[in-house]
Image: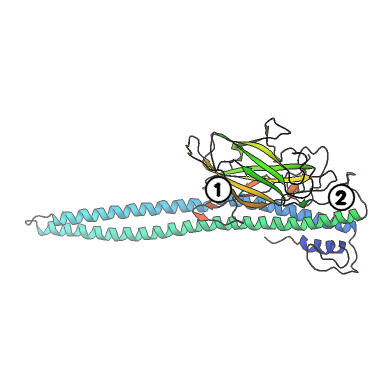
Amino acid sequence: MTTPVVMLSVTPAYADAEPAASHSKVSGTPTASNAPKASIEELEKAAAAAQKAYDDAVAAEKAAYTAMDAAFSDEAPHAVASRAAKKAAADAAAATTAAEQALTAAEAELAALPAEATEEQKAAAQKAVDDAKAALGTAKAAQADADAKATAAATAADDARVAAARKYEQARQATADALKAKQAADKALADAKAEEGDEDEDGDEDDAWEDCVDEPQLTSVVNGLPSKVVAGTTVSFSVRVTNGSDKTLDDVYPFVAVYAVDKSGYNSLDDLLTVQWSTAASPKWQVLGEDEYIDSLGTLKAGAHADVKLRLSVDAKAPAGAGVAFVAGDYLNEDGTCGGSPELQEYTFEIAAAGTKPGKVEDAKPSGTTPHTPGTAPQGTAGRTVSATGTLANTGSSSAVPQIALAGGVAVALGAGAMFVVRRRKADANG
């Protein structure tokens, strides 16, 4: 799958919308000072084309994921063929063992003939030995052939799984590329409308608001999450959100997402997890919503922090597996400026089957980061709206997709090695 060609059509339009002697944020090349500006109509067409290309890429990614899931199924043709070949090899090995035992028995009978045995008896016993040797040779040849076929079938099955996984990763990258093109087109259109003082179709002043920006000094840290959680239990932990910047943030919204898969790495256990939260402003325990945002912590002055209490319950029916918690923070100021943590912090943990005695369990440690795109207002923003342009808010896709790491005995490298790919934020965060 290749990068959508809409990227090529968006870049010139966006470049024309830049000030003279500037650099295009998409192409990185200087724009001509006398280049004509693209009209609003042209930019709208470019944005629509970029949106369609992005929607097509999202659909292709979903299809690739479905194909990958099917490739790892026990009922996939290559899996069925591999099992059949493995059974045939086992049967051939059993036949070889039986032939060896028959030869041993025939040789023992020949050796046990008494001295007064007749020539006919000796000849018959010798023939039995010769026949057993021939049968053993045939059995060994059949076993070698069956073993070779089993090895080939297993390799073909692994190759099919790896190929499907690679296609999914290519599709996922194509979606990311299409998103960048869409972001460029949307921003070019928004900038052009802002220059003309236009408002959006609803009459809101969204286009006048500044784009959401990264704020690496807005940090989120998990404390007390066990590195092993037993199915059928509830564990408590917390998230501390700290404003390490030099400015006051009017409303800060923690983002918390917890996902899990079984040991195969691609069967989701999300339906067996429940996450609840409580804050000083909202002390009553509440179930974490689908948008995965927690109500505003209120204003955080420079250097200030606030804590969120959390409870994770794992259903007793959950099998052994692995989970990950992602945390971040977004902010929304009264003047419309917005932004958030540029990365999601990852904390992985093990899920043990119900009844397991875990013994002493240490806290989960940060295990990595995943890109986080601030800019979509969570639920409960008192009627204020932040433009979702340029985020995954428009996908309408599920909040997380398990990423296969090990399956069928073969390692599949997808991305940077994270267990999950977070594709968060629903189609309309305020809907």
Task: Kindly report which numbered mark, 2 or 1, lies closer to the viewer in this rendering.
Answer: 2
Which of 234 and 13 lies nearest the eye of the viewer?
A: 234
| Residue at x 43%, y 54% (from the top left corner) | 85
10 Å crowding of disc 1: few (<14), some (14-19), many (20+): some
Toward the top, the furthest residue is 284
Q: Residue 135: horizontal and vertical position, in percent?
A: 28, 58
Q: Residue 38: horizontal and vertical position, in percent?
A: 89, 61
Residue that mark 1 sits on: 265
Q: Residue 171: horizontal and vertical position, in percent?
A: 66, 56
Q: Is residue 139 left or right of residue 377?
A: left
Which of 143 and 59 lies nearest the eye of the viewer?
A: 59
Q: Is residue 387 left or right of residue 282?
A: right
Q: Earlier in the sequence, mark 2 or mark 1?
A: 2
| Residue at x 54%, y 37% (from the top left corner) | 318
**Labelled pair 2, 1 in contact (Cβ < 8 Å):** no
Q: Amino acid at mark 1?
A: Gly
10 Å crowding of disc 2: few (<14), some (14-19), many (20+): many
**Residue 396 visible at all:** no
| Residue at x 84%, y 51% (from the top left corner) | 210
Residue 160 picture quarter: bottom right
Residue that mark 2 sits on: 207
**Residue 283, above or below 207:** above
Residue 381 picture quarter: top right
